[in-house]
Amino acid sequence: MSAALQELADDALVRRIAPGNPDAQACFRQLYDRHAQGVWLLLRSRLPQEADDLLQETWLRAWSALPNQYRPGHFRGWIFQIANNCLYDRLRRRRPTEAVDISKVAGRDTPPDGELLHDERREIFTRCLEKLPP
């Protein structure tokens, strides 16, 4: 890698990452070298076992988005936002997708909310009927 690339600011490197530019990969590598450790530490603090995969996903998304979706001025913040988005996407995929039948939860003696509402409405209706004249 040339010393000239090492001295360029992040925004200057981003501008040089364009289709057809022979320095594009070297410029991206320079950005990676500057910021990858910080991004990895962030990811490791949240999901230690998946930090390496998330780091790779972060930089793949950045490569796909550059230079079109980057707004000049704060590459470090931008790449950290991508890392956070990757992290949140991974956590969302872990959420259970099936509805849980609350009545089958161990130690649960009360009926599910829908049944409680139905029982409450029935009780109110019965009280109203009792107040009506014969």
Image: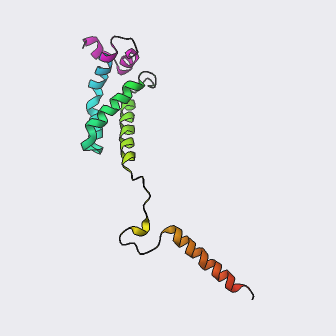
Q: Residue at x 39, y 53 (%)?
A: 96
Please identify the residue farthest to the right as the structure is shown: 133
111 and 25: which is toward the camera: 111
Relative to residue 81, is residue 29 drawn left or right? left
Q: Residue at x 26, y 36 (%)?
A: 52
Residue 87 position in % (x across, y down)? 35, 41
Magenta includes 7?
yes
Relative to residue 98, is residue 54 drawn left or right? left
Residue 119 lies in quadrant: bottom right
Residue 2 lies in quadrant: top left
Residue 89 lies in quadrant: top left
Q: Residue at x 39, y 11 (%)?
A: 20
Q: Which residues are magenta?
A: 1-25
Quarter that holds the N terminus: top left
Residue 121 position in % (x across, y down)? 60, 74
Magenta includes 77?
no
Quarter that holds the C terminus: bottom right
Residue 19 position in % (x across, y down)? 40, 14
Residue 48 position in % (x across, y down)? 25, 43
